[in-house]
Image: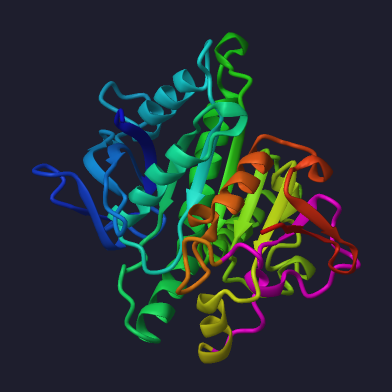
Amino acid sequence: MPDLKIFFVTNRNVVNYEASPWFGSRFNADGAHALRFGTAWGKKQDDDTYPYVVDRVEVAPEKLTQEGSGDRTVGSQKIFDALRKMMSGSRARDTLVLIHGYASTFETSLQRGLQLADIYKPGGKSLNVVVFSWPANGQMVPYMSYFSDRNDARDSGEAMARAFLIFNSYNEQLKAADRCERLIHLIAHSMGNYAFRHGLQALRRRLGDELPRLFSQIVLAAADEDDDAFDCDHKLRLLPNLGRRVTVYFAPQDRALVISDHTKGNPDRLGSDGPKQISGLPTKVVLIDSREVALHGDVWTAHQYYRTSPRVVADVTATLAGTPVDQVEGRTHVPDLRAWRIDA
C-alpha cells in the first residue's frame, strides 16, 4: 500500500534533531508549553504486534526571532499551509486531531495516528491526521509510570491550548478565497482525555467561558477521566462549546480503567459506565455503550477498541461523517442509560 502521511504537534523534548529528528519522553527544554510541528510518513506492515511502522519524520524549521525581522520562521505556518492544501480542492479531506493516552512513546503515538489515517474513512475518504504527542513515558511500570504520565498530561494542557489557538489564529487570518469547507474533528483516548480537560481549562483561562467552536465532532474514547466530568466547570462541563457534537464511548469491562479506578485511587471512570449524571447532560453529548464489542481485537484489556474493534471503528467512522445519531447502523437505543449500544 502507498505510504501514509500524517502531521504532529508535540511538547516533547527534541532528541538528535540535526542527525535524525525525534522526540523523547520529557518536556521541551524551553518548557512544557513549547511546541514543535512536523510531518511523519509510514505504512502498514504484516505484523500483528506493530501493524504500522514509522519510516520518516520531518520537523518543521523554527526560528523565533523578533516579529517583523526577515529571518523569522514559524514551524506551524509550514504545517498548516500543507494541511490547508490537503483540505482544499477536488480531493479535499476532513482532518482529525488525535490526543493519545497513557504509556505512549513519540513513536507509538505516530503509529496510532498512521492507523487512524488508514482505518477511519468517513464518506469513503481518508482523513488528514494530526497527532498531539504529549510526553507520556512509554513504560508500564506499576503506579510510578501512571502517576508520572498523569502529571505530564495535566502539565500539557497549556501547550494543547496554545496549539488550538495558533491554528485558530491562522485560520482567522486566511483570505476568503483560501479557506476550505472541510471539517476538523478530535478524538481523545484514555488519559488523553485528562490532558484534553486541562487543555480546555487553559483555553478558559485565556478566553473565559465564551469558547469558540474549534471542532465538528469530538470523540472521547475509553476516557480515563472522572465520571462527574460533565457536571463540573473545572473539568468538562463546557466541552460541548468546542464542538458540534461530543460522543462518549464507554465499556464496563475496560480493564485498564478498572485498574485506574481501584488501584490508583481515582473516582469511577467516564470510560467505564459513562457519565455519573445523565439528567442534566447536554443534548450535544451522545453516549455509546461499547460493552458488546470492546473485546474484539483487544481481548486482554478491552481498552483499545476505538481502533481494534471493527464494529467500533465503523461506528466512530459514521460519527465522524456526521451521521444523525439515530441513523447509525448497528446501534440499539437504551433509554434507561440515555445511550446507544453497539450491537455485537
Q: Residue furthest left?
A: 19
Residue 222 pos. (x, y %): 58, 65
| Depth order, front residue of 24/185 | 185
Residue displayed at 46% across by 63% down: 101
The vertical placement of 198 against 322, above or below, is below
- Residue at image coords 43%, 38%: 118
Q: Is residue 287 magenta?
A: yes
Q: Does the image show residue 214?
A: no
From which residue to which does the magenta span run?
Answer: 265-294
Q: Measured from the top left, where is residue 200 in percent x and y?
A: 62, 56
- Percent across and percent down for residue 343 are 71, 57
Quarter the C terminus occupies: bottom right
Q: Is residue 299 left or right of residue 341?
A: left
- What residue is drawn where x is 28% and y is 21%? 70
Between 269 and 29, the one lying in front of the other is: 269
Q: Residue shown at 46%/44% (left/top)? A: 116
Viewport quadrant of the N terminus: top left
Image spot of residue 206 (x, y percent):
62, 51
**Most frequent secondary structure within the magenta stretch:** loop
Residue 204 visible from this viewpoint: yes
